[in-house]
Structures are given as C-alpha cells and as structure tokens.
Amino acid sequence: GQQLNQSPQSMFIQEGEDVSMNCTSSSIFNTWLWYKQDPGEGPVLLIALYKAGELTSNGRLTAQFGITRKDSFLNISASIPSDVGIYFCAGQPGGTSYGKLTFGQGTILTVHP
Amino acid sequence: DAGITQSPRHKVTETGTPVTLRCHQTENHRYMYWYRQDPGHGLRLIHYSYGVKDTDKGEVSDGYSVSRSKTEDFLLTLESATSSQTSVYFCAISENREMGAFFGQGTRLTVV
C-alpha cells in the first residue's frame, strides 16, 4: 500500500520556539491533511490543503502542499505548552472517498515551559 | 466529537472470542470508516462504508468484518479475536472534501 514517511518522529523544544515537520509520499495525493491528537482522544483536523503549491494558515500553524503533490509541511510558530501532542499528516486520493486516508507515523511534540 | 459515539470505550477479551465494536453518528454523514492505531504505524484503514449496506475493504481488513444497516451505525466485528488485534480503534465520518474525516474518541481493545 501507499506509504507516508513523516519526520521527525519526535521533537523536544522550548516554549516560544518554532517547529517544522514534514511528510513525503511514494504516491501523489489530491489532498493533504494535518491532524493533532491529544492523549486518549481521536485526531482533530488542523489544516486541509487541496492544491499543489497551496500555503494555508490556521493561527500559528502554517502548512504547505508540495509542488510535486508527494509532500507536505507543517510549521508551528511560537510554540506554547498546549501544542504538546502527536501530529499526523494524512493524504487523500482523488475521487469522493473523502475520509479514506493514508496516515504518516506521527510526530510526538513535547514543549518545555 | 459530539456527533460520534463509540462503544465500548474499553474492552478486554480472550483470544478466539468474537467482538463487536459500535460506531454511532448523529450527523447523518454518508461516509463512515474504521481505523486502527498502533505505535509506529499511525492510523490504518480497516473498512469503510459509502452508505447503507455499501462497504469496502481498507488496508488492513483481514480478520475484520463490518456492517451498516442504518446510516447512523457502523459495526466492526472481529470474528475470532487474536492478540495482534490489540489496538485502539477509531471510527470516522465524512461528508465532504473540506472536513476530511472527523474522528470519534476511540475504543481501546485488549486481546489476552
């Protein structure tokens, strides 16, 4: 099946620092999504990207849909303690199967006050 | 996640026993999905449904079956549970491209 490689696997940063993570795929996706998961909860959608080259922001979060359609990046600026969690990228193929997603392995983010 | 309820939230079962997990939605969304989450693997799609009585296999469907007799309910059945099916199971719903998939709170299943 399709593989998404997400990096880094984990990050330990100080509050106020910026964070970058990325995902690469062996296949093309028509949509890239970024989710955050808190302990004991399901993933929550942060940002959705629909077009190659698209750059989208949601507060302190910015994500980009790679030109090749095989990668995506997520940046978090000025991190705060509540940013702690696991961040997942997900790719969605074309067609109408909107929730049929391939997920990366996740990036565990720890923010030290 | 107010529109999705998974039950049970936690379950311990013995190897070889059948297990059914339930996903109930109040959003009237057409598409429903079952994922499993394991360390180092992210979330992987087990089965999905396009509508009532319309289901299809995902990436890791072996050992699982599903049924959807009503729009609001999507059942996942492990016919004979194995230790490799110990995992956290998430139900998701979707209606349009903009929402991606909307996840429930998960069911933690332990097979001993």
Image (cartoon, helix red, strand yellow):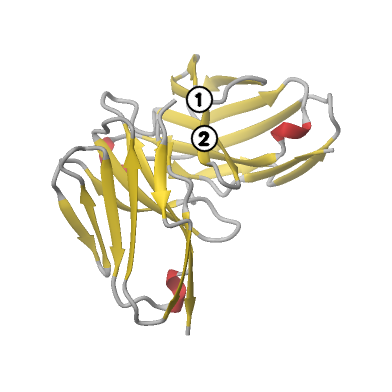
Chain bearing tag 1 is B
Q: Does residue A9 lie above or below A96 as drawn?
A: below
Quadrant of the frame with the C terminus of chain B: top right
Residue A88 point in image, percent of width and height = 42, 50
What is the quadrant of residue A80 in the picture? bottom left
Q: Does residue B104 lie above or below B79 as drawn?
A: below
Q: Nearer the viewer, residue B40 or B15?
A: B40
| Residue at 42% across, 70% down | A83
Q: Residue B2 vs residue A54: left or right?
A: right
Residue B111 point in image, percent of width and height = 79, 37
Q: Amino acid at mark 1?
A: Glu
Q: Does residue A66 lie above or below A73 as drawn?
A: above
Residue farthest along the bottom direction in this orientation: A113
Secondary element at image label 2:
strand
Q: Does residue B45 lie above or below A103 as drawn?
A: above
Query: Is residue B19 visible in the rendered structure shown here?
Result: yes
Q: Which mark is residue B44?
A: 2
Q: Which residue is mark 1?
A: B59
Q: Are marks 2 and 1 in contact (CB under 8 Å)?
A: yes
Secondary element at image label 1:
loop
Residue B63 point in image, percent of width and height = 67, 20
| Residue at 63% across, 27% down | B76
Query: Is residue B100 visible in the rendered structure shown here?
Result: no
